[in-house]
Amino acid sequence: VVYEQEGVFIHSSCGKNDDQDNLIAGILRVIEQENEVVVDWRPLDETLDTSNILCAGKDSSSVVEWTQTPKEKCSRGADRPSSYEAEWDMVTTVSFKKKPHSNGDATTHANGESKWSFLFSLTDLKSIKQNKEGMGWSYLVFCLKDDVKLPALHFHRGDSKLLIKCLEKHIALNESPHDERVLLVKTQKSLSQSFENLFDEPSSYGLLQKWKKDPYTVTMGKFSRVTNYIVGSLRSSDPSNQRRPPSEMADFFNDTIPGLKINQQEEPGFEVITRIDLGKQPEVSRREPVSAEEWAKNMDSEGRILDVDYIKRLIFKGGLSHTLRKEAWKFLLGYFPWNSTKEERANLQKSKTDEYFRMKLQWKSVSEEQEKRNSRLRDYRSLIEKDVNRTDRTNKFYEGEDNPGLILLHDILMTYCMYDFDLGYVQGMSDLLSPVLYIMENEVDAFWCFVSYMDQMHQNFEEQMQGMKTQLIQLSHLLRLLDSGFCSYLESQDSGYLYFCFRWLLIRFKREFSFQDILRLWEVMWTELPCQNFHLLLCCAILESEKQQIMDKHYGFNEILKHINELSMKIDVEYILCKAEAISMQMMNCKELPQTVSEILGIENSSVTPDSDTGEDESGAELSCPTSLYQSVSTPVTAANGTRDGAQQMAETQSLTPA
């Protein structure tokens, strides 16, 4: 049960005799079943025989037909006003007459009695009509396929907006152009199902439908289980037409993420990029991690950081020693201002502690009865508990079912739902929090660092997926500039939309690298050097590293998906950091850098070529590249494939007790 609301009434009234007026109280539920999501309303009558519930099946031949019996039909005057009351026309006493059906999804009753309970699958929903604002109780009218209308449901204990929000997790609803009160179901979007059942379906169409409606769940799951039938989802069943054109594939995924327009090979305006010579990638090396001594030397007597740019360059080139992370991450994430004194930071922590526990008390003090009436909070708790139980237990900090670290993980995520109730909890957030909590070893500091991290990442988790859409488009631009031939190959294998990078971008490679490596990778990215969107260049570096194998072995759609997924925990973080940095220098040194790419990398006040056929810069000015960011770091370095920091041993976990 993903939604439950009591006090949802059917108003049974003929409008003539008082003794015929009837308010039927009921309970409305939205239920996720194995293969579908259903809406269920039934009266609050414990003696109700559940066999009386009429169901709308999966096809139009089994949809319930709602008709009035002659003895119950009410006379209506010709002068009845067309107003709010007119919406009640359909809620006069009715009986249900089952249309002929063949699939046996529902039972036909011959006793002629009115059966008010109903249940239908979202696959049979055509539209939802809402009441006019400010006119009586909030109500909804469900219209099924074949224009079958169900009785209006009146919400006496609150409005219907939470129900609409719940339904939108499973179906796409668009406002009707003819009536703003009517929400139309977008037919190409099918129902949500769990990834665990994804590959058990007999229909190959199921995978792509699932990805379309819930890319988060699907991409966070086990892509390695993909089998050959997936290709059939993207290709025509007609043997004479074994591959869909790239433009059609782009349209298909544009339905998934509205506004996503990843340019295909034949689209005008990209030939100029294929002719740009970026030159050879420079050799890049990395240094040892920043030590506590180096950190202390760059701090004055009051605890201010003396040279922020310099310390960021050191961190970018080598990361941080483990003992320094607890302090330095607070600066990198924006919890501590870089120019703050030690005393100011102590005062900040004190005020933030008070604020945190006030929010924590809000959800801790919610009783079970209150939570039953708050479906959103109940949903958040359920999702959090599920994700926390799946936390990577290879790290000692999270070992065991009742480990204090897991309890704190749960409490911080619940408190974040109080901090940002609109966003709430979305799958993947626990992945972002677990390394932060591990480093902080403190509930309050971990929470506020996580809040700062989510300020950067929140667009990834918003319902419209605007952040994911933008990043996929930007990654496509960068990869095409870097290697147009590889892009063309991916497009030829129905993979040009780079959907296999979805998980990388969603949770910043959290599931692609080991726990220790992700600590290094994140702190480097948090420096915001050497350019904007450096994480996209990390994607380019990984893909370019795998290009030869993918192309030499002629991997198709399936094999590319499987290969990318199996890279998890096998990527050398130091090598990829070197390669991504080299790509950034290669692009920023290019004198013919397209304007689009310049904007993605955040290179401003530079003379770059417009995206034109000539690619020439009339001013003749050179592109300003921030290579000096690296040159001023005069510290020992290691090779690109150099040895890991041998001194970087993970500190012993302290005993933690949840607050």
Image (cartoon, grey):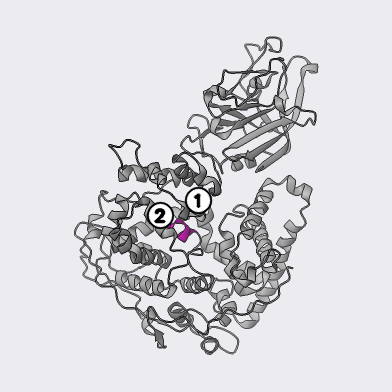
Where residue 110 sits: x, y (%)? 69, 15
Please state the horizontal and vertical placement of residue 78, each as a whole percent of the image: 62, 11
619 or 343, which lies in front? Answer: 343
Q: Is residue 78 left or right of residue 229?
A: right
Q: Quadrant of residue 18?
A: top right
Task: Return the disc, 1 or 2, that comes first in the chain's sequence.
Answer: 1
Q: Which residue is mark 1?
A: 218
What residue occupies the far left of the structure in this picture? 614
Mark 1, other Cα within 10 Å: few <14 / some 14–19 / many ≥20:
many
Asked which secondary structure carries label 2, the reply is helix
Query: Where residue 223 sits: x, y (%)?
Result: 47, 54
Give the spatial CA distance, label 1 vs label 2. 13 Å
Q: Which residues are magenta?
A: 497-506
Decide whether residue 501 is among the magenta residues: yes
Indicate which label's residue lies in the foreground, 1 or 2.
Answer: 2
Q: Is residue 76 above or below residue 216?
A: above
Query: Mark 1 belongs to which amino acid?
Result: Val
In the image, what residue type sits under mark 2? Leu
Image location (x, y in percent) of residue 306: 51, 85
Count of labels in the image: 2
